[in-house]
Image (tube, rainbow, N blue to C red):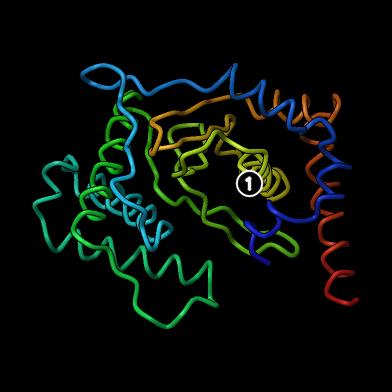
C-alpha cells in the first residue's frame, strides 16, 4: 500500500486517532507556525508560475531532484544549472519517481520546456537557501528511507535535516491536513520499528518559500486529545492494517 494513499484516505481512521485534526486546527496551525525562509539576502521570494505547466508533478519533482543532485555534488544550484548532464539526470529521476507514484499515467514521455526547466531551477534555488538556514553540522538527507511495518513497505520521505523530517509540497496553497497526515505516517513507522532518527516534523513549500518546524510529540498529543505518541502510533498502525485487510476483502 502506498503511504500517500493512506494520507488521503481512511477518513474514519484519522478521525478516530487524531480527532483534533480539523480545518479549524489547520488554519490556526498555519497562522502560528508557518514563516518565510530567511536567505542570504533577506526573505526568499516565492517562485511565481511562469505559465500553467502540462505536468506540474514532473516540474516539482525535477526541482527536488535537481536540488538533491546539486547538494550531493557539493555545488550551489546556480553552478549546477550549467551542468547539462546533472540537469538531464535529475529530470530522468523525476520522471521515474512520478511513474512509481502514478503507475496509470499515459505512456507518453513527459517533458519540460525551456521555461519550465528555468522555473524548476528557481524552485531548486529555494531548497539551496533553506538548507543554508541550518548549521553545517546538521546532516542533510534528500529522500530518506523509512523502514516499513505491517501493510506499509519501506517508504521514501522527502527531506531530513538533523533531527527534523520535512514533508515538501510545491503548491500555491496553504498547508493542508493531508500534509500533516503524511508526516504522521512516517513518524508512526519510526515509532513501531524502533528507529529514533527524528524528533521534529516540518513542512516546506518551495513554491511559496514558506516552512514550519514543530515537535512531533506536541503535535500528536494536540491532535489525539492528549495521548502520547508511544500509545497512539502502535494502535494507529494496527488499526490501519486491520482496515486495509477488510477493504481488500470486501
Residue situated furthest bottom in the rendering: 107
The residue at 34%/72% (across/down) is 110
Instruction: Indicate the quadrant where residue 223 lies.
Output: top right
The residue at 91%/76% (across/down) is 250
- Residue 9 x %, y %: 75, 56
Query: In which quadrant of the rendered image does the N terminus lie?
Result: bottom right
- Residue 179 x %, y %: 61, 42
Vertical side of 64 occupied by 114: above or below: below
- Give 44 or 232, whichever is nearer the viewer: 44
The residue at 32%/37% (across/down) is 47
- Give 230 or 201, whichever is nearer the viewer: 201
Vertical side of 51 occupied by 172: above or below: above
- Give 138 or 28, whichever is nearer the viewer: 28
How many numbered marks have been drawn onto this rendered protein structure?
A: 1
Q: Is residue 13 left or right of residue 69?
A: right
The residue at 73%/48% (across/down) is 192
Report which residue position mark 1 lands on: 182
Residue situated furthest front in the rendering: 51
- Give 100 or 229, whichever is nearer the viewer: 100
Q: Is residue 87 left or right of residue 176?
A: left
Q: Secondary structure at mark 1?
A: helix
Q: Is residue 107 left or right of residue 178?
A: left
- Residue 143 x %, y %: 44, 52
Vertical side of 95 occupied by 186: above or below: above
At label 1, counting other C-alpha atoms closer than 10 Å, the crowd grade (few under 14, some 14-19, many 20 or more) is some
Amino acid at each position: 500500500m502506498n503511504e500517500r494513499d493512506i494520507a488521503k484516505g481512511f477518513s474514519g481512521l484519522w478521525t478516530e486517532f487524531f480527532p483534533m485534526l480539523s480545518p479549524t486546527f489547520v488554519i490556526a496551525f498555519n497562522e502560528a507556525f508557518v514563516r518565510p525562509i530567511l536567505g542570504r539576502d533577506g526573505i526568499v521570494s516565492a517562485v511565481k508560475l511562469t505559465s500553467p505547466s502540462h505536468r506540474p508533478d514532473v516540474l516539482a519533482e525535477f526541482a527536488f531532484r535537481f536540488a538533491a543532485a546539486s547538494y550531493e555534488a557539493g555545488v550551489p544550484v546556480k553552478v549546477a544549472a550549467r551542468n547539462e548532464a546533472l540537469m538531464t539526470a535529475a529530470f530522468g529521476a523525476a520522471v521515474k519517481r512520478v511513474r512509481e507514484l502514478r503507475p496509470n499515467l499515459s505512456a507518453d514521455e513527459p517533458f519540460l520546456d525551456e521555461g519550465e526547466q528555468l522555473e524548476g531551477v528557481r524552485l531548486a534555488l529555494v531548497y539551496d537557501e533553506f538548507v543554508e538556514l541550518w548549521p553545517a553540522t546538521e546532516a542533510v538527507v534528500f529522500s530518506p528511507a523509512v523502514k516499513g511495518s505491517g501493510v506499509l513497505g519501506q517508504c521514501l520521505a522527502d527531506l531530513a535535516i538533523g533531527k527534523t523530517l520535512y514533508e515538501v509540497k510545491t503548491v500555491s496553497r496553504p498547508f493542508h491536513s493531508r500534509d500533516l497526515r503524511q508526516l504522521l505516517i512516517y513518524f508512526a513507522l519510526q515509532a513501531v520499528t524502533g528507529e529514533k532518527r527524528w524528533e521534529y516534523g516540518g513542512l516546506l513549500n518551495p513554491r511559496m518559500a514558506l516552512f514550519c518546524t514543530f515537535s512531533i510529540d506536541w503535535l500528536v498529543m494536540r491532535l489525539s486529545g492528549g495521548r502520547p505518541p508511544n500509545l497512539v502510533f502502535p494502535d494507529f498502525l494496527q488499526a490501519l492494517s486491520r482496515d486495509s485487510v477488510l477493504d481488500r476483502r470486501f
